[in-house]
């Protein structure tokens, strides 16, 4: 039976791909169907009124299944210009302690990372949800090798490009501006200094803008924090380990919203756009803490959690807008392969074991991404393997949960 399912999945993807010799899987322009407008909040929070056609191969996947999309290894487009930095072969460790952001309107996911002693290159990658193909948007800075190798506290290369860094969940996509925003992280080099710089990246012009051009470096443990963008207020809510800050995307000004906030680092934060609550889960030393910030009331709640809710660091964290459920998968310190779902309105958790899931015992942040057009969730587990995809249209508790 497993063999028949495997053949079916590969055949489905191949049927869609055969019309384009350059693509492993393509979008099917003829597959567009009526699809109720919904809200997709993965670093966008925006209404998905501008839609791309659903992918025919993804539509054929059986419900309650895990599969991989053939021909979608990030390494197929990765830079071969930089072989420094250092712990992973060929410099492809851009996933190390780093996340991703989704541009729901244009149907793409942006990746930027590396940093510390994992990878020195600062290039940006894109996964296109219309074609299910990778693209490298920029090349690594020529200054990466020499200027990352020294243990200095400079956040920027001499050519004006930002240094690569662990980005954790410290990036968002500013939907109003169509730009990636990144703040701080652990910069490349043998020490991995923390930094408080802020940048935007324009995927169309493929250029970076330093929002702190006169920044004088001071040491700051700006590591493992999380951020989420609210298009209604045009504010980025930034959650440190001890406070909630806001960054105004119009004025580029920071404000301390709450000085009393407590959540371990190495977690992710996501917005439920209808109820306007940002939920943060997971944390350092393997935590199962949940923090809920109500944007409209400006209040933080630390709801009780079930005794069997996994304690884990940097789990994959997504928002299923079809069912209005938060989703968690994997995370450092957790080797089971069940998906956990959370309803923030009722404070209910449940788990469901979908057969065939990959090992998720790593740092993932928001590289677990829900696609409301295709009703699937992508899992970017490793740049060396094809992208995983979970299809679970109607999540239900497992019988033994």
Image (cartoon, grey):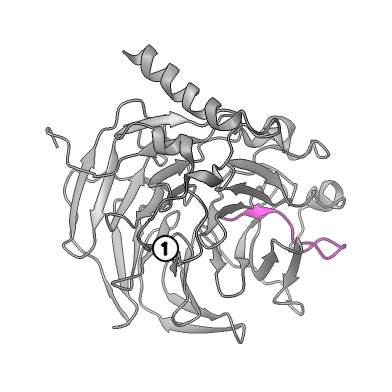
Q: Residue at x 52, y 45 (%)?
A: 30
Residue extending farthest left = 399
Q: Residue at x 35, y 25 (%)?
A: 356
Which residue in the structure is indicated by mark 1?
A: 41
Residue 80, given in percent of the width and then of the height, sits at 80, 35
The part of the image, by quadrant, that contains residue 173 is bottom right
| Residue 78 can be seen, yes or no | yes
In this picture, residue 121 sits left or right of residue 132: right
Please tell me whether residue 35 belongs to the stretch shown in magenta: no
In this view, the residue in front, 130 or 223, is 130
In the image, which residues are magenta? Answer: 156-168
Please, what is the dominant secondary structure of the magenta stretch?
loop
Residue 205, given in percent of the width and then of the height, sits at 76, 64
Q: Residue at x 51, y 29 (%)?
A: 13
Which image quadrant: the N terminus? top left
Which image quadrant: the C terminus? top left
In this view, the residue in front, 185 or 358, is 358
Residue 339, given in percent of the width and then of the height, sits at 30, 40
The part of the image, by quadrant, that contains residue 182 is bottom right
Residue extending farthest front = 30
In this picture, residue 395 sits left or right of residue 45: left
The part of the image, by quadrant, that contains residue 265 is bottom left
Asked if 245 appears above or below 84 in the picture, the reply is: below
């Amino acid at each position: 039976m497993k063999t028949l399912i495997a053949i079916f999945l590969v055949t489905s993807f191949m049927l869609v791909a055969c019309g384009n010799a350059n693509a492993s899987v393509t979008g099917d322009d003829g597959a567009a169907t009526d699809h109720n407008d919904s809200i997709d909040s993965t670093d966008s929070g925006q209404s998905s009124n501008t839609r791309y056609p659903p992918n025919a191969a993804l539509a054929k996947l059986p419900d309650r299944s895990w599969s991989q999309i053939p021909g979608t290894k990030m390494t197929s487009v990765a830079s071969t210009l930089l072989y420094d930095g250092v712990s992973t072969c060929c410099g492809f460790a851009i996933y190390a302690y780093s996340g991703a952001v989704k541009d729901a309107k244009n149907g793409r996911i942006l990746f930027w990372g590396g940093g510390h002693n994992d990878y020195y290159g600062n290039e940006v990658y894109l996964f296109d949800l219309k074609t299910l193909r990778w693209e490298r948007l920029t090349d690594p800075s020529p200054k990466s090798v020499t200027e990352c190798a020294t243990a200095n506290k400079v956040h920027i290369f001499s050519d004006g490009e930002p240094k690569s860094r662990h980005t954790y969940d410290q990036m968002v996509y500013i939907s109003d501006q169509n730009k990636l925003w990144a703040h701080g992280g652990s910069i490349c080099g043998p020490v991995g200094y923390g930094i408080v710089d802020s940048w935007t990246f324009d995927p169309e012009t493929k250029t970076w803008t330093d929002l702190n051009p006169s920044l004088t470096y001071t040491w700051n443990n700006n590591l493992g924090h999380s951020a989420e963008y609210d298009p209604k207020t045009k504010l980025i809510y930034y959650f440190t380990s001890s406070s909630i800050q806001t960054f105004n995307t119009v004025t580029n000004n920071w404000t301390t919203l709450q000085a009393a906030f407590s959540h371990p680092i190495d977690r992710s934060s996501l917005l439920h756009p209808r109820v306007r609550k940002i939920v943060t889960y997971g944390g350092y030393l393997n935590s199962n803490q949940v923090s809920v910030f109500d944007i409209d009331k400006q209040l933080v709640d630390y709801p009780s959690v079930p005794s069997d809710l996994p304690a884990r660091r940097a789990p994959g964290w997504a928002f299923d807008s079809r069912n209005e459920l938060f989703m968690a998968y994997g995370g450092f310190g957790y080797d089971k392969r069940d998906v956990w779902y959370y309803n923030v309105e009722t404070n209910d958790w449940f788990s469901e074991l979908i057969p065939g899931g990959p090992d998720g015992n790593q740092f993932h942040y928001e590289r677990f991404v829900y696609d409301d057009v295709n009703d699937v969730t992508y899992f970017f587990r490793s740049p060396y393997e094809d992208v995983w995809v979970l299809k679970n249209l109607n999540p239900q508790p497992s019988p033994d949960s």
